[in-house]
Amino acid sequence: MSVTIYHNPDCGTSRNTLAMIRQSGAEPVVIEYLKTPPSREKLVELVKAMGIPVRALLREKGTPFRDLGLDDPKWTDDELIDQMLAHPILINRPIVVTAKGTRLCRPSEAVIDLLDHPVGRFVKEDGEVVEAR
């Protein structure tokens, strides 16, 4: 199975998700989206595949979200995408793409349903134990 993860190595949730993917036996294509941001077309495609509103993909913590006033409902989807392209840190992560679907994996165990051979048990960096459903 092909697995792609839009990853930020500085994010614990993203690191845990990547570790769960690898522990399942898959070696994903890792896209560090801060170094290699998705194109507008790819970002729109990901949002559509996840079935979420554009606004749901915005990350607030540790980003210029407040400084840019992105909490104002006046922003259109196209304008929000423009902001994510201009400031990739605004894209929430990790996003995982497999043949089983595309998902924003927050929490990291949301990746389990996307994997062919998910781990039965995983211990996150903070010590939390995740049991496969």
Image: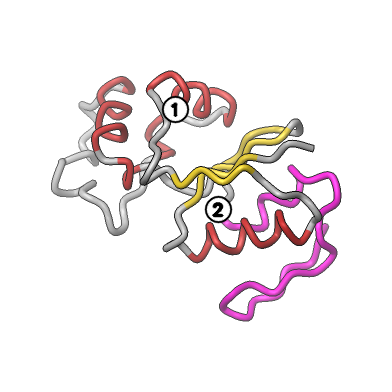
State the residue in front, 92 or 18. 18
Amino acid found under the numbered disc labelled 1: Leu
Q: Estimate the x, y position of residue 94 in percent, counting from the top left.
A: 52, 49
- Residue at 55%, 62% in the rendered image: 15
Q: Estimate the x, y position of residue 79 in percent, counting from the top left.
A: 25, 24
Secondary structure found at label 1 = helix
Residue under pointer 2: 106
Q: Earlier in the sequence, mark 2 or mark 1?
A: 1
Left/right of residue 100 with respect to residue 74 in the rendered view: right
Left/right of residue 29 with respect to residue 2 in the rendered view: left
On screen, residue 11 above or below 129: above
Q: Estimate the x, y position of residue 110 in percent, counting from the top left.
A: 66, 51
For the residues carrying marks 2 and 1, which lies nearer the camera in this image? 1
- Residue at 81%, 61% in the rendered image: 119
In the image, residue 6 lies in the stretch drawn in magenta:
no
Residue at the limit of the structure toward the bottom, as seen here: 127
| Label 1 Cα crowd, 10 Å radius (few <14 / some 14-19 / many 20+) | some
- Residue at 66%, 62% in the rendered image: 19
Q: Estimate the x, y position of residue 91 in percent, counting from the top left.
A: 38, 42
Q: Quadrant of residue 57?
A: top left
Span of residues in magenta: 106-133
On screen, residue 73 above or below 90: above
Image quarter (top left, top right, bottom left or bottom right) of the N terminus: top right
State the residue in front, 1 or 54. 1
State the residue in front, 120 or 22. 22
Residue under pointer 1: 43
Image quarter (top left, top right, bottom left or bottom right) of the C terminus: bottom right
Amino acid found under the numbered disc labelled 2: Arg
